[in-house]
Every structure is written in C-alpha cells, then in structure tokens.
Amino acid sequence: MPKESDNAKGSDNAKGAIMPKGATMPANENPFIIENIQPCVDGGRFPVKREVGDVLTVTAAVFRDGHDAVNVLLKYKEKHDGGKWHETDMHCINPGLDVWSGGFRIEKNTRYLYTIAACTDIYRSWLNDATKKAQAGQNIKSELREGLILLENTIARVADEEDAAYLANVAAMLKKEMESSGKKKNPAGIKPSGRKSQDEILKIFSDSLLGDFMVRCAAREDLTEFAPALEVVADRVRARYAAWYELFPRSQGRAPGKSGTFKDCIARLPEIKEMGFDVVYLTPIHPIGITKRKGPNNCLTAGPGDPGSPYAIGNAAGGHKAVEPGLGAIEDFREFERACRAVGMEIAMDFAINCSPDHPYVSKHPDWFFKRPDGTIKYAENPPKKYEDIYPLNFYAPGGAWESLWVEMRDVILFWVNQGVKIFRVDNPHTKPVPFWRWLIEDIQREHPDVIFLAEAFTRPPMMRALAKAGFTQSYTYFTWRNFKGELTEYFTELTQSPAAEYMRGNLFTNTPDILPKMLQEDGRAAFKMRLVLAATLSSVYGIYSGFELCENSAVDGKEEYLNSEKYEFTVWDWDRPGNIKDFIASINKIRRENPALHLYKNLRFYQADDENILFYGKSTEDGKNIVLVAVNLDPFGTHDSLLHIPIDEFGIKPDENYELHNLITGQRSLMTGNQFHVSLNPDIESSFLFRLERWGEKEEKFDYFGM
C-alpha cells in the first residue's frame, strides 16, 4: 500500500497527496456550494417581478468544507446598460442551515441581473484562529506575523491612495509594536513602559473597521459565483397598484344610433376620475371590417347602420395602426391621451390580434394566415362556434413568414407607444405562441421599460402561469367565478403567498364585456357592492367594465353574457340613472388611495371569522404603520353576525393594550382591548366593513396616492 508522503500529512489538499488510482484534482475547482437561491423562478429560466422602490431580498444556502470564515456577496447590475456589477454584503441568518440573506433597493424601471458570490474570508479566518489560541494561553507570535503579512500584501491591491495610506499606517504601527514586544524584558520581569502585549496587539488586529476594510480589499483567490445570473423585472408602481375602468369609446356619446367620439370620451374623464380610477381601458379603436359583419346580440346579419364588433379589425381605412373614422382621427386620439395625462390618468389599449377579411394584411401578406387545401383563408372557429368576421393570424406561418409577422406585431405596439400609450391589455394571448410573447415583451421593454402588458387569458392555470413567466406584467384571474369563503381563501392564498406571486400579479375584474357573472345577474345591488370591495382589496390592481357602476345586469337567457351588448351595437347610457353605486365606488377607491397597505399585493392574510358567510382578511405595510382589516358578507340576501378574531400578536399589540378600529366606510370608531370584535353585516345597508387599526394615542398619518 502506498505510503503517505510527509508533506501531505494533515492536509487533504496538500501538494503531493496520494490520490486514488485514476483520480485527478479538478482544475480551478472552488470549495463553495451555493444553492436554493430565493427568489428564483424555475431555476432561473424566468425573471421575478418587483416594482421601483422595492428592496429585493435574496436568500441562499452558502457553505464550504472546513471551518474557515466565509464572505458572501449579493451582486447586481442593470441588464442592458453594460455597466459594472455592484456588491452588497450578505449576512448569515441561520448558521445551522448556512442560510444567508442580503438585498438591494431597486432604483430604476428596468431589468436587473443578480447573483451570489462567495469566497474565503482569509483575514477573519486567520483572526478567529489567532484569537482562539490567545484565549487558550498559547504564544501567538507567529500568528501575529502572519496577520501583518496579510496587511502588507493587501496594500498593493488597494487602488485608492487614501485607503492604501490608512492600511500602510496601520501595518507600520503594528510592525513597530510587534518588534518592540519581541525585545527582552528587564531583570525584574517588568515590561518596559509603552510596550504592548500580544493580546493588546491582537486587539488592534480585531478592530471592526480594519476587519471590514480587509474583507473588502482582500484577495478572492477562491471566489465562486453562481451562474447563470438570475433576473428581476423592475416595473413601475402602476404595474402593482391601479384601478382600471373599461369602456367602449363609441358608447360615450349622446345620440342614439351614432358613434361616440374621442371628444365624448374626454367629456367623460372628470366623472371617471371622480370615481377614483387612474387607468382608462379602451376596447379596440381600429377600423371595423365590413365582410360578415355581426349584428346586434351577435346575430350573423348586420343592418346598414350596425357598427359590427370592434374585435373584427381592419377595412379600407386601415388596420391595427389606424383609428376607426367614427371615433375621430389620430390627432383626436392624441388629444384624448393628453387629456388623460392632464388629470393623472393613463390609457390602456386593447391589443386584439384579429383581422377582418377586409384588413390590409389579407391582401398584402396572405402568407400570414391559415389556409384551406383550396388556398382560401380560414376564418376563426371554436367549434361549434364560427367567427366568420375574423381571420386568425398564423404565428407559425411557413416559409419564414412568421418572422415578418412577429416584427409587424411588435411594430404595432411601438406605433401606439409613440402615441403615448404605455399599457396594453392583450386579447387571448394563450392562442399565440408563448415564445412570441417572451420575445416581444422583452424587446419592447428594452427601450420602453415602463410599458405594461395585461394578459386576458381565461384559460388553464398552467398556460396562465406560463404567460406570466414569459413577461406579462399582469394577468386576468378566476376571481369572477370565486364566490364562497373557502374557495376565495384558497385561491387568493395561492395567488399572493405561493411561488406564483414572484412572477404573476392578478388584476381582478368584477365583470367584462364577455362575462356578466350569475351573481351580478341575480343577486342585486348588494352583490355589486360586495364584489367591488372584494376586487378592490384582495388585490392591489383591479378593474370594472363600464355599466358596473349602474348595476347593469340584463343578460342573455341562460348565459353569462350581456343582453344588447356594446360589442355589437351603439349604446347610449344614462350615467346617473337611479340605483347607481358611483359614490360607493368613489369611497372605496379613496380608501385605497389613502391606505398604502392596499397598494401592496403579497401582503394579503386571511383571519378567522366565526360565520361561514363572512370573509375576514387584512393587509399591512411592512413597518406596521398602516393596517387595514376587511370583513365582507358573502351572502347578498341575508344579514350575518360574527366574531372577528383580530391577530393582535401579529401586529405587536399586547392583550391588555388599547387600540382603535376605525370603520373607513361608516366613520365609526371603536376602542378595543383584546382580539375579538363583533360585526353585523346587513347587505341592504352595508355588506362590508373596512377597518383601519390604529394604536391608541398614535397620530394618524394622512396618505393620498392618486396615480403614478
């Protein structure tokens, strides 16, 4: 058996160690293991999402063999600017599991890369060993010499002249003290005056300022960096916090049988703003096809004055880069955009990738469409339904045609970005390739990082999640069909507290032009108010489709569809008709603006209410200065009483401590002690209470946030 060489004793990695037959030492192998980085989506394949002003907190398990001290760094930089990496220290928050944590503040609306690096902390490893020996009463003369050599070797690596001078002065002073302490004592055994002991010299080496300096400037010979770097999309705050109001521009006029115009839309802005909305979402505004145009209530034959569906885009007046003449000209649209901006609102545009048979693409780019065996273009179908007024585009078009199609769709978005539009609701994105969306969204956001994309994808959960991972800023959800306590609690816990919350923001719509839920059809005004509160407080971003404020509930018999839908005809509304809930909507949106806890998405928590019909939940800012609790009666027909169990321990309130519950809807204040509060919710009066928890004697902070 081979005999171990002398120079290998006591060191597994010592040069000359005998290794198993056939084994070789890996070149440039580093001793560190970096794993379980959070946040991380699918092993880093997709970015996580945050907003400007957030601190991205990153954790990971980082460790190495042996007992040496470890230096762990969080590195980050902007993805597209080509700049240098920034570093910030990470700190061990669980030594037993080697869990480290660090963070950096997101300052810009852009994409960032981040990763973790680790290396041996040579100085602190030396200092730890020297300290242990000194505490054991051992002579540490040699160890002090090693420490001095570490200082002297570091000076050459310090670029800053002042820093180098500081370190040189410390090294010179220590060298002098060490030489002095090495001289013989006088015959009486008394140390000469001014001479420092080894313990005193070690104390100088242990100075925290010097230690931090040495960590920062030390050689990183075994630096290990996790690769590839992870990515975070830093959106503007409106990506997380907004209230959307959807409308058909052609239904904003006052003349029956005639299209409203952008000027009519401008006239409605004060009312929409007064209700507290900050995003005006327009259904398609492009020229509408003539061929196979739909009539009222989706009938297959249109009359001479019927406008058709705005989702059948394109005629002789143009396609996706043009405006329907009945609404006005492109300059009228620009005037509307300026008017929105002047009152602190934004336009969201519907990006519907549908073409009527009359769209200019049909004649100019027939290879972009699906063909039958006889060469004719296929219309859209969802058997047994037929949509003969629409030709779907083929995003896998053969012969390379798909490439020019993808570029054209990107250019459509850029055209409207140049008109001032920075928010796009994308119609049926799940019927187009996910790789297309990933390419388009990142390509747009490279130059226009403030652009927001909402995925209208009422489809299977895996596809909804895939679209969010691919880059969609917000996503439609199944909120419309979640009505009972158990399913609401389960679904919104999943949306806001599972890994999906790292990349998916749910935009809750109470209704849409395509969906009039059964509850709104049948359960009266109380149901509209209850669903409004749920949408506005369960998520930080929500929307309504116009007519909701009027409690419009006329439905096609047996379907979740509006009767006499605006999708197929001009409509003139009485925006002040009796029974409207405009004031209630305005009050809820005002409460949202004034309470920053309701601007956040992932802070939703559900709490105990004894009655099965009462949903009780809350949101709090991280510092606990703003806490909002919401109790909602989910039964629109009956009064329900319940004890609410308030998690005072979670909020740092002692069992015998006084605090207030301020009902933000009624204005009532209740002085509280303990964790139980009784509510009675009558849907004919108030089906919901929103409480702000205020510590007794604490000054109430005013906060009014009206747009970004």
Image (cartoon, rainbow, N blue to C red):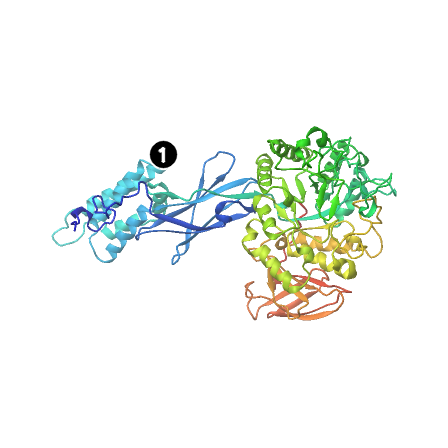
> Residue, x 72% and y 29% (percent of image)?
363
- Foreground residue, 224 or 307? 307
Image height check: is 448 above or below 607?
above
Q: Quadrant of the C terminus?
A: top right
Image height check: is 47 above or below 555?
above
Q: Is residue 194 visible?
A: no
Single out the residue that lies furthest toward the top: 364
Residue of label 1: 161
Q: Amino acid at mark 1?
A: Glu
Could you classify mark 1 by the number of other residues whose Cα lies within 10 Å: few (under 14), some (14-19), or many (20 or more)? few
Q: Is residue 699 left or right of residue 559?
A: left
- Foreground residue, 202 or 617? 617
Single out the residue that lies furthest toward the front: 374
Coordinates of residue 107 in the picture (x, y in percent): 54, 42
Coordinates of residue 600 in the picture (x, y in percent): 60, 52
Coordinates of residue 27 in the picture (x, y in percent): 31, 40
Q: Is residue 358 left or right of residue 401?
A: right
Q: Is residue 26 visible?
A: yes
